[in-house]
Amino acid sequence: MCGRYTANTEDEVIEIRGILNALSMRLSSDISDGMLAAYAGLYGKEIYPSENAPVITCDGILRYKFGFEKWDGSGLIINARSETISSSRFFKPFLKNRCIIPASHYFEWKKVPHTHTEKYKFGSGKSGIFMAGLMDAKPGKESFVILTKQADENISFIHERMPVILPVSRILSWLDGTLSPDTLASVCVENIFFDMAI
């Protein structure tokens, strides 16, 4: 599960801009202006559900709300299980609306029996992480969810789920629909580091 994460730092945004420019001219047509607008006031900020945050789409960098409205209007859905989105009545209509959620790192909490809860942060590399997501692009509903998978063995003692974190080489294939949701778990980044958060 991924309920909070940190927006990229200014240095990471510069690195991401270079990555996106190298990936595709189609993605980079408005990268410079779009990135600056999407990240305005967010560099290094912790992002909570219901807040607006940058997402990478085939149309450039946009700023959408973190979380889909629940079908009954009683709150937000912030994550979707990658293993079941293709068959889910709720998520299946959004399969063509793919996005990448760039982040510096994400957070998970581990409950320690009879004492407290420990907060951990997870990340990877100097350009941050790229989480696979789905978005609702309908006017007035612009929002996204983060896809999750079974946690890697080295971090499963903290939480049994983790975001689907894609390598740079898979960003474009996720966005353009050539990467199947059924294969997401097998193409994820595996060198995720973690540390206790302060």
Image: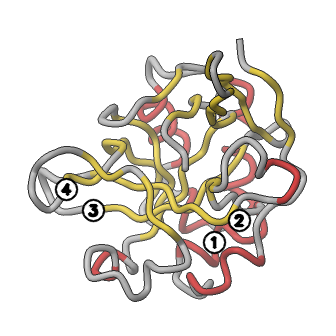
Q: Residue at the location (37% across, 72% down)?
A: 97
Give the amino acid type for the residue marked by disc 1 in the picture: Leu
Q: Quadrant of the C terminus?
A: top right
The residues tagged by marks 1 and 3 sit, at their Cα atoms, a distance apart of 19 Å
Q: Are marks 4 and 3 in contact (CB under 8 Å)?
A: no
Q: Along the polypeptide, which appears first: circle 1 or circle 3?
A: 3
Nearest to viewer (mark 2 / mark 3): 3
- Between 137 and 76, the residue placed more toward the observer is 76
Mark 1 lies on residue:
172
Mark 2 lies on residue:
23
Q: Position of residue 110 (x, y in %)?
A: 66, 33
**Crowd class of label 1 (few under 14; some 14 to 19; many from 20; radius 10 Å):** some
Mark 4 lies on residue:
70
**Crowd class of label 2 (few under 14; some 14 to 19; many from 20; radius 10 Å):** some
**Crowd class of label 3 (few under 14; some 14 to 19; many from 20; radius 10 Å):** many
Q: Residue at the location (72% across, 30% down)?
A: 121
Mark 3 lies on residue:
136
Q: Is residue 60 left or right of residue 71?
A: right
Most distant residue in the front direction: 114
Q: Are marks 1 and 2 in contact (CB under 8 Å)?
A: yes
Q: Along the polypeptide, which appears first: circle 2 or circle 4?
A: 2
Q: Position of residue 181 (x, y in %)?
A: 56, 82
